[in-house]
Amino acid sequence: MELSTLSLKEIGDALRKKTVSAREITGVFLERINRFNPELNAFVTVAEEEALAAADEADHRLARGERVTPLTGIPVAVADTICTKGLKTTCASRMLANFIPPYDATVVSRLKEAGAVIIAKTNSDEFGAGTTTGYSAFGPVRNPWDKNREPGGDGGAAAVAAGLAPLAVSFDTGGSLRRAAAFCGVAGLKPAYGSVSRYGLAALAPSLEQIGPLARRVDDLALLYQVLAGPDPLDATSLPADGPGRGGEELTGPAASGKGLRIGLPREYFTGDKLQAAVKERVLAAAGIITGEGGEQVDLTLPSTEYALAAHILLAAAEASSSLARYDGVRYGYRSPEAADIDLLYKKTRTEGFGSEAKRRILLGTLVLSAGSYNDYYLNAQKIRTLVIREFAEAFTKCHLILTPVTREVPGRAGEERSPLRQYQDECYTVGANLAGLSGLSVPCGLVDGLPVGVQLLAPAGREALLFQAARTLEAAVGEFSPPILRG
Amino acid sequence: MKLEKEKAKHLAELARLEVSEEEAAEFSHQLSEVLDYAGKVREAPVEGVEPTIHLLPLTNVFRDDEVKPFLTREEALVNAPRREEGFFRVPRILEEN
Amino acid sequence: MNYETVIGLEVHVELKTEAKVFCGCAARFGSEPNTHVCPGCLGMPGALPVLNKKAVELCIKAGLALQCRIAPFSRFDRKQYFYPDLPQAYQITQDDLPLCTGGKLKIVNPGGEERIIRINRIHLEEEAGRTYHSGIGATGYSLLDFNRSGLALIEIVTEPDLRSPAEARIFLEKLQEILRYVEVSDCKMEEGSFRCDANISVHPAGSQEFGRRMELKNLNSFKAIQAALAYEENRLGSLLAAGTPPVQEESRGWDETRGMTFFMRPKEKASDYRYFPDPDLPPLVIAEEWVEKIREDLPELPEEKKNRYMKEYGLSAQDADLLGGSRETAEFFEATLRLYPGEAKTVANWVMGEFARLLNLEKLTPAQSKLKPEALAAMLQMIDAGEISGKIAKTVFEEMFYSGKSPREIVEEKGLVQISDESQLAALVRGILAKHPGPVADYRAGKTKALGFLVGQVMKETKGKANPGLVNKLLREELEK
């Protein structure tokens, strides 16, 4: 039995039938991690001991016939920007290289309650600021499809694609989770704003980001999402229990027909000359598959798309400059050894502790929020955000879901020198969901030059069931494909 | 918009970062390019549009006035780069703020 | 040449909440360092603020007590600066949409003139941690305690309406009194729960333009505030008189021992705090009904109380002020009065006299003392019924104060019941007269002062228990026979 390729349901069945123990499952993945992670560098920390203990606990639960969930005994990789009590949480930064949080993020508590086994902490760009993991203090993640290609801005997708963990939890400020899912050929969801608690996620841009799930299958993605999502009294921006998207609908199940389904295709997302023709072709084909027989494709226009990325760049930087100010070497984390007074301590610590992209965003954000620029940059960006929200809301009266590419191209060469602006522009199709707080699901739709391509499905909060259904339809048609390493 | 090198240095100072001359030049170059692009937010048709200060239509999200102890002192201090008798210790503070 | 002084105040007041303003840590003073902390008030990654509802209510309460307008829509902003006591490197505060605006407080200045001091705004924010400086020079270092970090704080900003250091002090005392009264804060200056920065400028009388503003910081007693302002008023006046007005706005400290202000730093032209709305905190929408509910819970304010005491009970302005000035005293007074049908003035005299004396002696507040209004009311009724004398009552009162016993218990235990039995007293009186023929002769010769001596002898004989009115009457009858 090739455990690393099974679905959650299959593993769950095996666990309940006692043909395999949780300890064995965790053991299999730990072994794969030991074998493949050195070349992939998807993880900053592997929690071998803790994972085995959690697996044993799951086995006890199973043995005693206690309540189990679809995640009981299932290994999950968690982004290293998400706090895990007693387990190093570095945010892929030198600043927090030795930080051990004395608390769990709410999503981690929820995973533990569901009986999941936290197996490792995933690598990413420092504090999630970047699109290629090239800004991790611990080296870049490699794409399991081709180690010379970049994996997107998050190691969770690479880990899942390579079978180092069946599931991963990561976060998305401008598209890093969805791009990584697309580039590594797995499914990933940036949930609607407020549906998953941000408590315990080291903030980069709090008004834009959400924690979300990654999985090889859409049903697994839905199961993990249901564990992560829910109201949280510790997060004031978490949607209340009776809010939209809290309906408790069934998110898993067989593929349904596209009958009556209206899929919107926003013109602005398909016209840029930077959109690779083969990628565009795959994405449009996906739209055809989802609408299938009886569905409908709706031509949309979202005129503010032109300004959306600019607004996102400014807002993300503004919020990052504030979020990252707390890392000052006073209470925890890195402290420069050579500081004779507090001002030097601040400067040396922050200069030595942060990498170049974090610094760049801090500088840009500091500018955006300065008295002289606030109205021009910050307020105008927030006004554009209003336009973006309005246009999406209007669009969703004409269609159920919106379909777009996730990326303009297949994964680029690893380590390629590109200016910061070019890198920001990588996220041109994904920032809309962050600005407007929409659900954004990235699901594989085929290969181009042997590399995976993803399609993005967007929905307002509350339309998750339809979102997963459409993704499942596509998944069923496209069929499974996986990098050779998964079978290795 | 061009972001002058001196301005980059000033921003670094505000953000408590040290930048060398070369770094300042590089940041100023890169951020000028970013601002050339992002500066278009000033030309967007936003007349009369309210900024989205809060994404969700939530208001008055409260906690009750109840004490919930969270960390022990040891947990609070365990990550401290330097501590002394239950306090966090930092080098001298030159100017009273 | 005459000069005019302009003073405005910024007062920080810690609110009386159980927990901090954005987390569940205890808001307690005087604990071991770093024992009431959490990821939030330590600024750890991932922690999020959730607003304490009580803190909002107390801020609104303060606003209502100072006749402010309560904003229907309000929000929190981040004020960004680096200082080791500020764990997130930003303070959550309110910049352009504070909870309360445009209030006022009436004071009577030393010249007896009524002045209205306008309140510009009151906003809610979080407190910083505490820094302790150790060592000196290059070997110096600082220690940080974050127990205070995140306490609920309001900042009250006045308009520049104060015209003298004495007025400033009176205003602050009045403000403290009111905030304690409505139970918004303990307002303990010595614990830092009531702090004040003062802005002062001096200009030639009649000039339309104010002088350069000096900000006086770290003033930690009313005395220090008045003294520092007076020193600064003088200094600025002298500079003007010498034709060398100050060239820049400054932040200045107060040297208590030398009794002078000193230069700290130039006041930068409004530091760039890079305020922006905190994305972690949804805004506040304050419904009219909520404000009205808080207003209904508001106690009668000292000013209103004072007027009512004068009108209803016929108390003097001074007495009314004294009784109404402290909420606990006023409550004790009124509770006693509800149980005692006699004169309000009688109750007032006991509360302001013996009670105040003993409270002061033992450093207690009315609520902390063992004496309850029921006991005082019962004692006063015993006096009126002639069961105890006013003199005995003082003994009984003191005993009640320390033991918490009822007056009847005390009187019975100690046998303090007044002797009002006429035949018993008549016998005693005859005995005294027989013992003191001299004074008796004096009285009969017209020296009526001798009566006092004889009364005293009877009281002495009865250890003060004789009914003095009756003794007087019986003595006169016997002497005039």
Image (cartoon, rainbow, N blue to C red):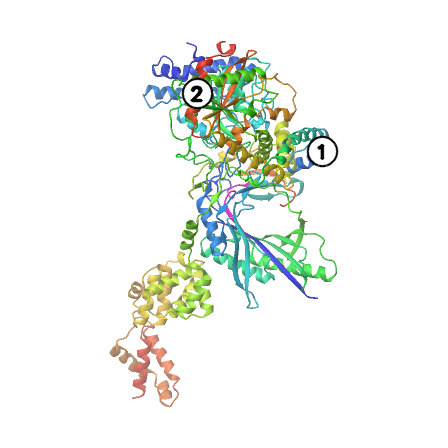
User: How far is disc 1 from disc 2 in space, using C-alphas?
Assistant: 56 Å
Name the foreground residue: A229 vs C381. A229
Residue drawn at (48%, 9%), measured in percent from left and top? A487
Left or right of residue A331, residue C409 in this image:
left
On screen, residue A42 versus residue B67, left or right, reads right
Residue A212 place in picture, x, y as percent: 48, 26
Q: Is residue A357 visible?
A: yes
Marks 1 and 2 in Cβ contact (< 8 Å)? no
- Residue C300 at x, y = what percent? 42, 59
Q: Label 2 is placed on what type of residue?
A: Gly
Circles 1 and 2 on the same subunit: no
Residue bearing the label numbered 2: A295
Instruction: Say few, some or many: other residues with alpha carbon within 10 Å of mark 1 (under 14 / 14 to 19 / 20 or more).
Output: some
Query: Residue beneath label 1, please?
Result: B5
Q: Give the range drawn in magenta.
A: C144-156
Could you tell me residue C125's position as x and y percent?
52, 45
Amino acid type, callout 1: Lys
Report the residue that reaches farthest toward the right.
C243
Q: Residue C470 carries which label?
A: none
- Whether A153 is drawn above or below A3: the answer is below
Please tell me which residue lies in front, A247 or C323.
Answer: A247
Q: Is mark 2 on a helix, strand or loop?
A: loop
Chain of the residue that carries numbered disc 1 in the rendered image: B
> Is C186 on the left or on the right of C269, as rendered?
left
Whether C454 is drawn above or below A102: the answer is below
The chain ID associated with circle 2 is A
Q: What element carries label 1?
A: helix
From this viewpoint, is residue B85 visible? no
